[in-house]
Amino acid sequence: MTPPNSIDAVQQMLAAQNYICGRALATVVFLSLRLGRPLFLEGEAGVGKTEIAKAIAAGLDRRLIRLQCYEGLDAASAVYEWNFPAQMIAIRTAEAAAAGTTTDRKALQAELFSDDFLVERPLLEAMRPDPRGAPVLLIDELDRTDEPFEAFLLEALSDFQVTIPEMGTVKAPEPPVVILTSNRTREVHDALKRRCLYHWVDYPTFDREAEILAARAPEAAASLSREVVAFVQQLRTEDLFKKPGVAETIDWAKCLLALDVISLSPEVIADTLGAILKYQDDIQKLQGSEAKRLLDAARARLEPA
């Protein structure tokens, strides 16, 4: 599928995948697709950074390739590695077959370092041709890696090619759609950011979050959805170690539906806090009368339906 030809078309494409976004985010997605520039999304965990890559891949009918970053990730783990056990079996087989004969070492070496024994990792996969078009490469939580990997990634994203010493250089016939995300646990180097279009993904407004919840949990009654969103938005104003994201809003609404809840109460909130808060210290803050105080404040913010 060809990329959308307008910002409105981007919003419609994402909405068709149940991803509701504002015009600012749709604009930077449109420019990323039109200009072939990587898109760098930064923001708190759970605000939809990863989900937008999934929505873009589904909307464009492209393959989604995900590189989940972690501390200690290196180029070899991100690009390729050789299937060492299979290579050893091939060597033993060749030695047994060549007993009493002259082994062709060059032929064996060529066989060992061929596609048959190559294990492709996300970056190399993203460089391969695909009949459906260039894949969507999601480099998720880049802030978890270290600077040497950033430097390598900077080079890889500049030329969209990687080098395998035993086989040569692999260059993407068409640059992949690259989306990088960061939860900002540390600052990513400016040199990498300059290669990208940047957007800060913030918590949505009440109306936007209500629209997102309606798309992701359409079976929830409108009155319950509004209460859930209002309570979560009120909760984000509190001094918490980890404020709930949109993902937690959706999870909580689905938990309430599973319990056949039709309206929030302090008791229901206390029983289901684990769906929206992930740290015991934060949960402790909502014990006793605190849940009722927040619920009353949330309902006071609600306009008549």
Image (spheres, rainbow, N blue to C red):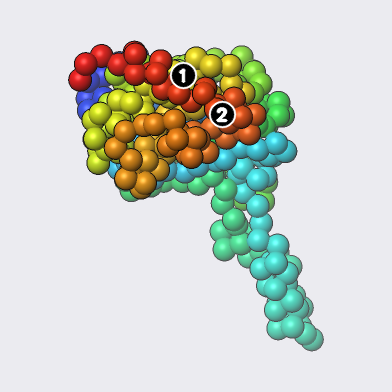
Question: Looking at the picture, how far across and down is residue 65, in whole percent?
Answer: 47, 43
From this viewpoint, which residue is outermost toward the right? 100
Looking at the picture, tell me which residue is in the foreground, 224 or 242. Answer: 224
Question: Looking at the picture, how far across and down is residue 192, in whole percent?
Answer: 59, 20
Q: In which quadrant will I find the C terminus?
A: top left
| Residue 57 occupies quadrant | top left
Question: Looking at the picture, how far across and down is residue 89, in whole percent?
Answer: 70, 73
- The local crowd at label 2, few if under 14, some if 14 to 19, many if 20 or more residues have their Cα within 10 Å, is some
At x 30%, y 30%, the residue is 225
| Residue 106 occupies quadrant | bottom right
- The local crowd at label 1, few if under 14, some if 14 to 19, many if 20 or more residues have their Cα within 10 Å, is few
Q: Secondary structure at mark 2?
A: loop
Mark number, residue 293 = 1
| Mark-to-mark CA distance, 2 and 1 | 11 Å
Looking at the picture, tell me which residue is in the foreground, 285 or 240. Answer: 285
Give the residue type at disc 2. Answer: Gln
At x 34%, y 18%, the residue is 299
Give the residue type at disc 1. Answer: Arg
Instruction: Judge from the rendering whether residue 216 lies leftward or rightward of residue 201; answer left or right.
Output: left
Task: Check disc 2 and report the residue beneath it.
Answer: 287
At x 55%, y 27%, the residue is 288
Looking at the picture, tell me which residue is in the foreground, 288 or 102. Answer: 288
